[in-house]
Amino acid sequence: MAVGEDDVVVAAARAGDESAFAALVERHRRELRVHCYRMLGSFEESEDLVQETFLRAWKSIGGFEGRSTLRTWLYRIATNACLDALDGRARRVLPHHVTAPSDPDVPLPPDTEIAWLQPFPDRLWEPAAPSEARPDTVAVARETIELAFLAAIQHLPPRQRAVLILHDVLGWPAKQTAALLSGSVASVNSALQRARATLREHLPERRLEWAPSAEPTDQERAVLRRYMEAVERADVAGVAALLAEDVRATMPPYLMWFQGREAVVATLAESWDPGSPHYVGRFRMVPTGANRQPAVASYVRGPGDPAYRAFAIVVLGVEDGRVAELTAFHDPGLFPAFGLAAALPPAHR
């Protein structure tokens, strides 16, 4: 859409034309969803906050005078909506933020009262078609969204989180960030210093310098394929061969989590053994994309069940050819967002 056409559409939207307003804001939906996800750590709430952003924008479009770009204006509204939503809320976490490593012999029930971090479907991040690949959305698609980073920034107070995302992740200058947050450049710089110090405490040392996210490498895809094949065979030794010595496995909303290859393998052996009281069933694995990391949707067929049921979205952290982190989000309600079926027939491959 040319600049002149934009002006006409903005004028129509300001005059109360709902279709013109929708044409203006819908092009920004994907990147605003990612922004809200970074702020809240919740995919489901990011959807709600984008709708809240558009509602607030519609109510105030008559006062939009073009002193900033429409994109900047929408980011201001979205950021403020997120800050309002975060007011007084507990941060979103993963199990290792809540409790010590678990004993494989002592299972713990799920805890649905805790605000858990959620994965983000890659299919809803990048533009759906080349025609949608506007410079602003392409720039956002290059920024990090890895789970370790998302988990770390949840430790920041909401305003510091907003400053760090706008300045360090999206690359906005301090002056523009300050204007969006109705603050001063000095306050932004001060918030950045405190936010970066906090991140250093919560990020793995190897992740202190964040490069833009990219598609999983060929090596990472090969590890994912081997992992999927081993799980489908219930091959504990095959999975063990892929794990780093200090691998960490978490399973929100279950509080239990395991540190180290020995503990992870012991847990898998128990849940894959048909003679065990903790036997889960047989698995089918479907590759997917989450947080620009190797990921798989796992389906399980329990004893006597004719179908494989949605079980978990598993996100892998692969380093030096080994799985360093396994995060299995046990929430079948996430499957539709990944474009995945709720169940697979027994013969599915």
Image: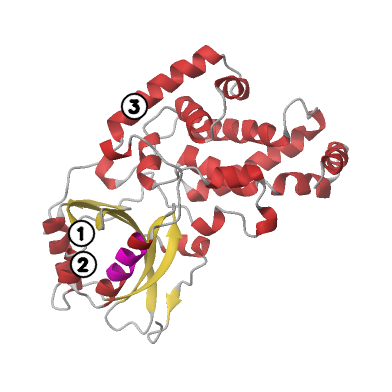
The kind of residue tagged 3 is Thr
Residue tagged 1 = 243
Which one is in front, 219 or 92?
219
Q: Circle 2 sits in a helix, a strand or a loop, which is it? A: helix
The answer to whether 247 appears left or right of 124 in the picture is left
Residue farthest along the bottom direction in this orientation: 347
**Residue 32 image-quadrant placement:** top right
- Residue 10 part of the magenta segment: no
Q: Horizontal and vertical percent for residue 314?
A: 35, 60
Residue range corresponding to the magenta coloring: 220-227
Residue tagged 2 = 239
Q: CA distance from mark 3 to mark 2?
A: 34 Å
Who's the residue at 76% across and 32% down the image?
60
> Which quadrant of the rendered structure holds the C terminus?
bottom left
Chief secondary structure of the magenta span? helix
Which one is in front, 310 or 140?
140
Who's the residue at 20% across and 59% down the image?
243
Residue tagged 3 = 198
Q: Horizontal and vertical percent for residue 194?
A: 38, 20
Mark with earlier residue (3, 2) = 3
Mark with earlier residue (3, 1) = 3
The kind of residue tagged 1 is Leu
